[in-house]
Image (cartoon, rainbow, N blue to C red):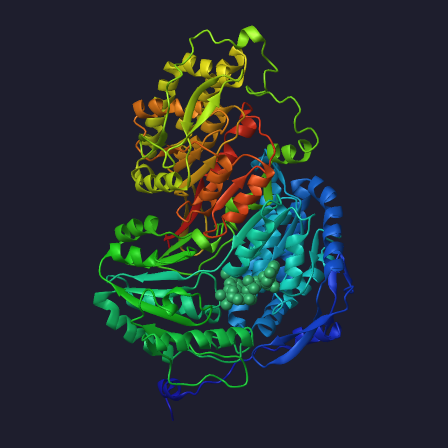
Amino acid sequence: NPTVKDIFDTMDYGPAPESAASAVAWLERHGRTFDLFIGGAFVRSASEERFDVINPATREVLARVSQAGEQDVDAAVAAARKAFGPWSALSGHARARYLYALARGVQRHSRLFAVLETLDNGKPIRETRDLDLPLVARHFYHHAGWAQLRDTELVGYESVGVCGQIIPWNFPLLMLAWKVAPALAMGNTVVLKPAEFTPLTALLFAELCQEVGLPPGVVNIVTGDGRTGELLVAHPDVDKLAFTGSTEVGKLIREKTAGSGKKLSLELGGKSPFIVFDDADLDSAVEGVVDAIWFNQGQVCCAGSRLLVQEGVAERMTHKLRERMERLRVGSPLDKAVDMGAIVAPVQLEKIARLVEQGKAEGATCYQPSWAVPEEGLFYPPTLFTNAHPASTVAQVEIFGPVIASTTFRTPAEAVELANHTRYGLAASVWTENVNLALDVAPKLKAGVVWINCTNLFDAASGFGGYKESGFGREGGREGLFEYLVPSWEKRQKSEVRSQKSGGRRQATSEGSESTADETLPSFGMPPIDRTPKLYIGGKQVRPDSGYSLPVFDAKGNLVGEVGEGNRKDVRNAVEAARKASGWTKATAHARAQVLYYLGENLAARAPEFAARLSQLTGASRRAAEAEVEAAIERIFFYAAYSDKYDGAVHATPVRNVTLAMLEPLGVVGVVCPDEAPLLSLLSLTLPLIALGNRVVAVPSERYPLLATDLYTVLDTSDVPGGVLNLVTGPRDALTKTLAEHDEVDALWYVGTAEGSALVERASVGNLKRTWVNDGYARDWFDPVQAQGGEYLRRAVQVKNIWVPYGE
Ligand code: NAI
């Protein structure tokens, strides 16, 4: 008789299929034909056009789904608009109840959702059942909580309005949850477009919305391909767009929405490094690779697709990986025992195969297991490239399939350099048993998520999102809520100011409105006319490249000085100086605070002189000018105070982790200042950035640049290191364009005209700068609610979530 051991040793693999019956019954109940979900009901598309949705594991047609056209998108946006008023007026508690009901509903129907997702997408049932669905429910629960707390935790912010949400096919229902839950929790309404390959679970979710009695129009679902997406992007009554997908389409959306005033968040592609140091637990690291690149067939935006292994263990790691690959199982995704299912669509399968061929042609060593994948569906085997050159196609291009490219490194510094050698910055994973090394490397990685001795972990409490060309904005965590909120003051400005744009705002520059002829005569002595300040770059005054100067006139039209006429070259030099001043970013917050306090002290010492200058140039009354200088000094103190108090958070993520949400400076930020309150606005815009460790290239008010040039000596005497604040005077439009197009500028804040705002958003597509523009609306620089504080600090940093092992 065979022993148990014999049986285990000789036992053949037998499939353990999950039944598709309930999902098939659901499809049949709908006649395998689906309409659009608009205003709480399923309605027929005006275009009557439909397309096939296939099961990638069998190539069978699962259903026919509507292609929403212009009239349909109009109707969906109108339904969302109509629902927005009453929905946003509900108490947080009322919205919490709806989100809670959605969470419970997802759990109630979780197996139906999971099976349907597997049929539609091709991913293993093990993943949809054990990961996607629990995370979807978790997301709705977590955000039910945020809905409940919204009225007390997020005071000073309002709902944005109608949100257009465009999602990809790799995690169809999970991406829906990431988009819909926070939007609804913060009081917005939604028009969501699922990916054309995988619209079915979104349609089942629409039924769930009906089931829980969600008010009509709060969630609308329009199916269709990129054309439907384009209509949503272009729709004038959409207030916010949230997109997850390719970097290419993300950039297109940035361009198309430039100047529209629409709020935008982009979650784009990645080429995330998976770094293995020589002291790592290699067996864990091998399992990590399985989760990093073979999870969801590698169709994961944050997939660990670049394996960086320290030289001493590279051979062993490769050997272990190849062995592990032999034991992976690719097959019917409904089989509960498979590791990898099908690739979502023929076009994606072709793309993967093409890139792998390219990798071979470029000379990297390609390894695939000895067994063959099933032939009837869209399957691709796990693939490992070794000796991939860091600049080669397989090491640089997002393959979006089960393909990992490996390279070796010698030192931690080299690992960091290789890891950051990409245009993307979505995620990174670090493997070492040495906590010092892990926590030394984590801050150096340019990525929105860092996993230490783990990978591909997600949770509603943790923010997720990219650095660099992986996009901007965060989803999840407290930080993700702000994508669906707008500061009350900004919303007010945009809606009110449209009509009364030139109405008497309380500004020191209000063209003499508060002044009389006598009052404007400064009593502190006229500054000498012959001072010709240059530009301020790298802590030095430098002559403008153009060799030209621009005349500056006072309020009465007298020539009072000249300033340098900065050009492209000067901006480039200023950016280079700012790049070099990285010591400021590394300095302690305490050190930065001290410098700022000192700046305040030195400006206070020269307050009368600055007030005189303001009054002379702008024609403001002495009283108003003195008030502006006082406000400027207070603003400096405000940001000095904040520089060591604006902290990140520790998110309580499950599993055996805590997640450190670290706030990191953006890097080099361009600032373009308005003419209003020229001293105060310059400081209001540059100080939050500087306080939190950024370096700034600012274009001061074009009309009143002498206020900025007078600051040079104050900066010099206050120990502000050279390159931290660079000032380039000159023609604002031309300088703005150069800043917006400059790839070494990480972010750009612009306060000026509507046209200028549009230009900034359009021209910043190249490196996907984080932009903040005012769309031409005036801001009251004296009002602390709209000129300082939360929104300024929040926009001066980006969040890096570091998952650290913690507890058991
Ligand atoms: P995609 O970016 O074209 O599709 C994502 C979503 O955007 C879909 O809903 C699509 O219908 C919509 N869309 C397409 N064109 C649009 C337009 N002009 N305006 C508005 N919406 C539009 O991605 P695709 O073609 O499905 O995949 C191509 C590559 O993109 C993949 O191989 C992968 O590299 C990358 N990708 C990255 C994802 C991520 O999560 N980062 C997700 C999906 C794809």
In which quadrant will I find the N terminus?
bottom left
x, y (%) of residue 767? 45, 52
* Front-most of residues 182 and 610: 610
Quarter of the displayed picture in which ligand 1 can be seen: bottom right
x, y (%) of residue 11? 41, 87
In which quadrant will I find the C terminus?
bottom left
Could you tell me if residue 130 is visible in this image? no
* Front-most of residues 419 and 320: 419
As drawn, 396 above or below 93: below
As drawn, 266 above or below 336: above
Q: Residue at x 63, y 32 (%)?
A: 493
What is the quadrant of residue 150 in the picture? top right
* Front-most of residues 742 and 532: 532
x, y (%) of residue 40? 76, 56
What is the quadrant of residue 508 in the picture? top right
Relative horizontal placement of residue 50, taking residue 248 as reference (left or right):
right
What is the quadrant of residue 94 in the picture? top right
Q: Residue at x 43, y 52 (%)?
A: 468
| Residue ranking furthest to the bottom | 1
Relative horizontal placement of residue 214, taking residue 480 as reference (left or right):
right
x, y (%) of residue 237? 70, 47
Relative horizontal placement of residue 564, taking residue 97 as reference (left or right):
left
Number of numbered callouts drawn: 0
Could you tell me if residue 23 is visible in this image? yes
